[in-house]
Amino acid sequence: MVLDVDKKYLKEQQYKSSGNLEARIAIHERFRTNPESFHKWIWDNMKINQPIKVLEVGCGTGQFWTENYSALPENSHLTLTDFSDGMIEKISSKLQHENIKFEVADIEDLHYDDNSFDLVMAHHVIYHSSNKDKAISELKRVAKPDGLISITTNSEKHMLNVYTIGQSIDNNYDMVRNIDGFTEEDADSILPKHFENIQKEIYEDLLKVTDSDFMLEYVKSTTEPRKMNLKNSFYDEYSEIVKKEIQAKGYFGILKRSPHFICIK
């Protein structure tokens, strides 16, 4: 599915501050059943064992480096970027190390020289680009020869019941998700146009949500910035569905599937 990406909406509403993203991160961290966190799993996949120069595009709240900075080899250097000033303000106050710099940057027009970084990371960000091929080309351009480009996204099946429930309550609930346009299934066909050497790993998890309030905060983080014209009872009805499943099973279950593509320039 090809979507028009409204960068103004993303910058001024969805990611103006870190609140919406933090609500989504919280549900994964609190209710995952996979013993390894997604971010640590990604780091382990890359097998970094020597000093590197890193560019992360779309660093968000910086959760990846909150979990993995201590594993970074000495004398490494990080450049963490996001196109949201609010995100950069948040992460720069949280991660304060001499070898990290923070900058606002656009994935489709990176202001870095060719062949600059050993590792270029774009985790759950390419789907925000209006021109996926241009974004991937930019990631590849700034990577050094034989450098790694680390890309993550979600499957079409990822957390699907969260969206189908919303649709069942109100037809105005938009089933088009941010990831549509660069899902796992899209990436499988797009990335080979840019890279000959691609390693793909899959992270799967079952969230067992036992607190309906957490679930509602997640749903609101995906709906309210988009100003959906939902009926007044939407959140109450959603909450009731979640509560009934928790009462019946002990938890509200959400299946996750996210690929990690490690591409070599």
Image (spheres, rainbow, N blue to C red):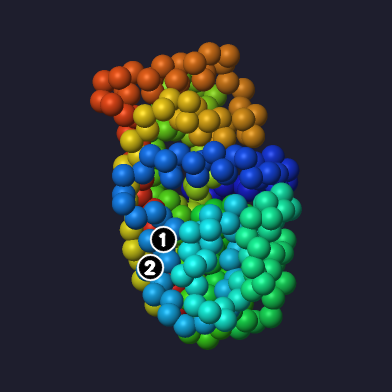
Count of labels shown? 2
Q: Are marks 2 and 1 in contact (CB under 8 Å)?
A: yes
Residue furthest top in the image: 233
Residue 74 drawn at (x, y percent): 53, 79
Badge 1 crowding class, 10 Å Cα cut-off, few under 14, some 14 to 19, many 20 or more, is some
Q: CA distance from mark 2 to mark 1?
A: 6 Å
Camera sees residue 186: no
Where 251 falls versus 32 (above or below)? above
Question: What residue is rendered at 54% in x and 38% in y?
Answer: 23
Q: Residue at x 61, y 83 (%)?
A: 115
For this rendering, which residue is in front, 125 or 30?
30
Which residue has dot 2 on it? 44
Where residue 155 is drawn, which disc sits there?
A: none
Looking at the picture, tell me which residue is in the foreground, 217 or 183.
Answer: 217
- Residues 206 and 181: in front is 206
Q: Residue at x 35, y 66 (%)?
A: 200
In the depicted structure, whether residue 206 falls above or below residue 52: above
On the picture, is 231 further left or further right than 48?
right
Nearest the viewer among 91 and 248 is 91
Instruction: Tell me which corner region of the image, top left, top right, bottom left or bottom right, holds residue 144.
Output: bottom right
**Where residue 42 appears, x then y in whole percent?**
41, 63
On screen, 164 above or below 25?
A: above
The three-letter amino acid code for the residue at tag 1 is: Lys
Q: Secondary structure at mark 1?
A: helix
| In this picture, residue 186 sits left or right of residue 57 | left
Residue type at the position of mark 2: Asp
Quadrant in the rendering for residue 40: bottom left
Q: Which residue is mark 1?
A: 40
Element under disc 2: helix
Residue 17 is situated, as x and y percent measured from the top left of the image, at: 68, 44
Q: Residue at x 62, y 60 (%)?
A: 95
